[in-house]
C-alpha cells in the first residue's frame, strides 16, 4: 500500500512538472530568446525634455511622435542617473548602458590633469579629416573606454551587422556608433555645408555621401524661417519677443521671421542651419539617404543606424525652453520623424525594424524668466568664485598656486604644489568644501575622499557618484542650487542632476515591442541592456542598467 501511494505521488509530480513546461510549439525564439529585426534605429533628440511630448501633443501630427507613443511602449518616468547631463556623456550613456564613472566620457570637454590641458570627448589629432580640408574631421571614439550596444552587435555577428552613426554634432554621431562602426558622419558648416567623417573609419567618403553633398541640399535649407503654423496657435509657449532669448547676430530682436540668407555671413555660414529646425530636416534627409546608400536592413543580420537630432539643442541654448522657436522646432521635427518612419517602412519594411527614441539630457527654464515669475533661480559666476577661492587659500597656506583648474563644477588640485608645500590633500579638500558651502548659490559639495570611500545610492549624491571618474574627475565637486546655472542670462542650458535636466523621453517601437506605457522609474542606462536583451546579444561590457522587459511582446 505504501509503495502504491508513493507511485501515485511520483506520477502526479511528473505529470505536473511536464504540464508546467512549455511545449515546443509554445516556444517562440523571436520573442522568448531573441528578436531579429533587420535594423535597429536609435534616435536621440538633443536637449529634449519629457514634457515636450505632452506640452506640444495637440499640435503634433499623427505620423511622428503620436505614432511612436500610440503604437510603441512609452516609459514616462525615465531619468539620467548621473551628473553632468551634457551631450557627450548622454550619448555615451544611452548606448553603453553605463554612467560616466564607468564609460569615461565625463563631459563634452574636460581638464586632463595628466596632459595639463583640456581635451574634447571625441577629439583625436592622430586621425585625419575626410571630406573637408579643415580639422573638423579629426575625431574618433578613442576616449570612450567601454563598448556600445552597436559594438556588441558587430562582435556578435562577426562584424557582418553594419553600424552607421549620423548627427550634426561629431560627438552625437561618433559615441553612439562606438569603436567598431563602419562609419560615422557629421555636418561641417562654415563655407562648406558638407557631411564629413574621419580616417578612423575610411580614407574617402563613399559615393552616396559625395552625391548628397553635391546635391545642394544644405543650400536649399538656407531660406527664411517662419512659424510652421499661424503664430496665434503657439499658445503652449511664451510671447515671441521677450528679454530671455539670445537671437542671431545681424538681426535686431528675436521675433519671427528669420531671414537666414541675410544672416548667414554673420552667423557661421552653413553652421547657422544647426540653430534652426532645418538642421534636423537636413539630418533626416541624410539618414534616409543612408538607408539605401549603406544597404541598411537588407538582409537577416541586424544592422544599427544611430541618428541624433542636434538642432533642438542649439535652438534651446539660443532661445530657451519656453520659446516659440523651440516649439516650432519640435513641430517641424515631428514632420521629419514622420518622414523617417515612412522611409523605414518602405525601405526596410514595416515590422522589420526596432526603433527607440530618447534624449541626451533635458534643459532648464531660463533663470531670468523664472525670477520674473518669482521662482527661486539665478546665476553663478565661476570666475569670481575661483578668484575668491584662491584668495582664501593664499590666506591659509601662503602664496602658492594650489588650484590647477576649475571647470565642469569641479576643482582640480595642482598636485606638484600640494606635495612641494607638504599640504595634506584630505585637509585641503575639507577646507575647500567648507569654503564653498559658505558661498551663495552652492547647495552641496563632495570631495574626492568622500566619493572614493562611499557608494551613494540615492538622490543627488548618487548622481555625483555615478558621474565621477577617479582618474579623469577633479578633487572637489560642487552642486549648485536648483535652477542656478553658470551661463548667459538668455537661453537655456543643462548639466545638473535636477529633474528638468534628467527627465527624458524613452519610447520603444517596432519589432518585438508591444504597445503600452509605464510610470515605473527607469534610467537612461537601461536602454542598451534592453536592446541587447531584445537581440539576444551580450550587454555592453560596462553596462550597469537592466533590461526593460515590460516593453517586449509576450
Image (cartoon, helix red, strand yellow):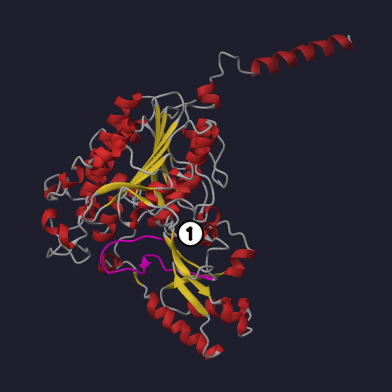
Q: Nearer the viewer, residue 258 or 506?
A: 258
* Residue plotted at (19% across, 67% down): 243
Using the image, determine if residue 488 lies above or below residue 77. Answer: below
Q: Nearer the viewer, residue 137 or 79?
A: 137
* Residue plotted at (42% across, 27% down): 38
Main SS of residues in magenta: loop
Residue 490 within the magenta-colored segment of the rendering: yes
Q: Quadrant of the N terminus?
A: top right
* Residue plotted at (21% across, 41% down): 214
Q: Nearer the viewer, residue 53 or 120?
A: 120
Residue 349 within the magenta-colored segment of the rendering: no
> Circle 1 sits in a helix, a strand or a loop, which is it?
loop
Is residue 295 shown left or right of residue 550? Answer: left
* Residue plotted at (22% across, 43% down): 332
Is residue 424 shown left or right of residue 44? Answer: right
Q: Nearer the viewer, residue 509 or 149?
A: 149
Q: Residues within 10 Å of mark 1 (few under 14, many from 20)?
A: many
Q: Position of residue 80 (x, y in %)?
A: 46, 52
Using the image, determine if residue 23 lies above or below residue 260. Answer: above
Q: Position of residue 309 (x, y in %)?
A: 31, 46
- On the image, numbered disc 1 is attached to which residue? 106
Q: Position of residue 529 (x, y in %)?
A: 52, 40
Query: In this view of the protein, can residue 248 be seen by the observer?
Result: no
Is residue 299 shown left or right of residue 426? Answer: left
Q: Position of residue 27 (x, y in %)?
A: 56, 18
Q: Which span is picked out in magenta?
A: 476-497
Query: In this view of the protein, can residue 341 be seen by the observer?
Result: yes
**Residue 44 picture quarter:** top left
Amino acid at each position: 500500500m505504501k509503495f502504491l501511494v508513493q507511485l501515485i505521488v511520483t506520477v502526479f509530480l511528473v505529470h505536473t512538472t511536464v504540464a508546467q513546461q512549455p511545449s515546443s510549439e509554445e516556444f517562440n525564439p523571436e520573442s522568448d530568446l531573441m528578436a531579429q529585426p533587420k535594423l535597429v534605429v536609435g534616435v536621440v533628440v538633443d536637449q529634449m525634455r519629457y514634457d515636450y511630448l505632452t506640452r506640444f501633443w495637440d499640435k503634433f501630427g499623427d505620423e511622428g511622435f503620436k505614432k511612436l507613443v500610440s503604437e510603441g511602449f512609452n516609459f514616462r518616468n525615465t531619468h539620467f542617473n548621473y551628473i553632468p547631463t551634457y551631450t557627450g556623456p548622454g550619448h555615451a550613456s544611452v548606448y553603453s548602458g553605463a554612467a560616466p564613472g564607468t564609460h569615461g566620457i565625463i563631459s563634452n570637454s574636460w581638464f586632463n590633469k595628466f596632459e595639463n590641458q583640456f581635451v574634447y570627448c571625441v577629439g583625436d589629432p592622430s586621425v585625419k579629416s575626410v571630406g573637408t580640408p579643415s580639422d573638423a574631421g579629426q575625431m574618433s571614439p578613442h576616449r570612450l573606454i567601454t563598448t556600445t550596444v552597436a559594438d556588441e552587435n558587430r562582435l556578435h555577428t562577426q562584424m557582418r551587422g553594419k553600424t552607421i552613426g549620423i548627427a550634426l554634432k561629431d560627438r552625437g554621431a561618433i559615441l553612439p556608433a562606438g569603436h567598431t562602426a563602419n562609419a560615422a558622419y557629421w555636418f561641417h558648416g562654415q563655407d562648406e555645408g558638407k557631411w564629413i567623417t574621419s580616417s578612423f573609419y575610411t580614407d574617402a567618403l563613399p559615393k552616396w555621401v559625395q552625391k548628397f553633398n553635391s546635391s545642394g541640399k544644405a543650400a536649399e535649407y538656407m531660406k527664411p524661417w517662419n512659424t510652421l503654423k499661424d503664430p496665434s496657435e503657439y499658445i503652449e509657449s511664451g510671447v515671441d519677443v521677450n528679454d530671455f532669448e539670445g537671437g542671431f547676430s545681424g538681426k535686431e530682436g528675436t521675433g519671427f521671421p528669420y531671414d537666414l540668407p541675410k544672416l548667414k555671413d554673420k552667423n557661421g555660414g552653413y553652421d547657422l542651419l544647426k540653430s534652426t529646425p532645418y538642421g534636423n530636416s537636413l539630418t533626416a534627409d541624410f539618414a534616409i539617404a543612408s538607408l539605401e546608400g549603406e544597404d541598411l536592413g537588407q538582409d537577416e543580420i541586424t544592422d544599427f543606424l544611430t541618428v541624433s537630432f542636434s538642432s533642438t539643442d542649439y535652438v534651446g541654448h539660443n532661445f530657451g525652453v519656453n520659446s516659440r522657436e523651440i516649439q516650432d522646432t519640435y513641430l517641424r521635427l515631428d514632420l521629419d520623424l514622420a518622414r523617417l518612419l515612412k522611409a523605414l517602412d518602405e525601405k526596410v519594411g514595416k515590422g522589420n525594424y526596432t526603433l527607440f527614441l530618447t534624449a541626451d539630457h533635458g534643459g532648464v527654464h531660463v533663470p531670468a524668466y523664472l525670477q520674473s515669475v518669482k521662482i527661486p533661480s539665478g546665476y553663478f559666476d565661476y570666475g569670481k568664485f575661483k578668484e575668491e577661492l584662491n584668495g582664501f587659500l593664499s590666506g591659509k597656506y601662503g602664496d602658492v598656486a594650489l588650484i590647477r583648474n576649475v571647470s565642469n563644477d569641479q576643482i582640480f588640485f595642482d598636485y606638484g604644489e600640494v606635495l612641494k608645500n607638504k599640504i595634506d590633500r584630505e585637509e585641503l579638500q575639507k577646507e575647500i568644501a567648507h569654503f564653498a558651502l559658505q558661498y551663495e548659490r552652492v547647495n552641496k559639495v563632495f570631495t574626492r575622499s568622500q566619493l572614493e570611500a562611499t557608494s551613494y545610492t540615492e538622490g543627488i549624491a548618487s548622481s555625483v557618484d555615478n558621474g565621477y571618474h577617479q582618474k579623469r574627475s577633479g578633487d572637489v565637486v560642487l552642486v549648485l542650487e536648483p535652477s542656478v546655472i553658470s551661463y548667459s542670462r538668455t537661453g537655456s542650458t543643462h548639466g545638473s542632476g535636477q529633474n528638468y535636466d534628467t527627465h527624458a523621453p524613452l519610447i520603444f517601437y517596432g519589432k518585438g515591442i508591444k504597445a503600452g506605457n509605464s510610470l515605473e522609474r527607469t534610467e537612461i542606462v537601461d536602454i542598451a541592456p534592453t536592446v541587447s536583451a531584445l537581440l539576444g546579444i551580450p550587454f555592453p561590457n560596462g553596462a550597469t542598467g537592466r533590461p526593460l522587459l515590460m516593453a517586449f511582446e509576450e
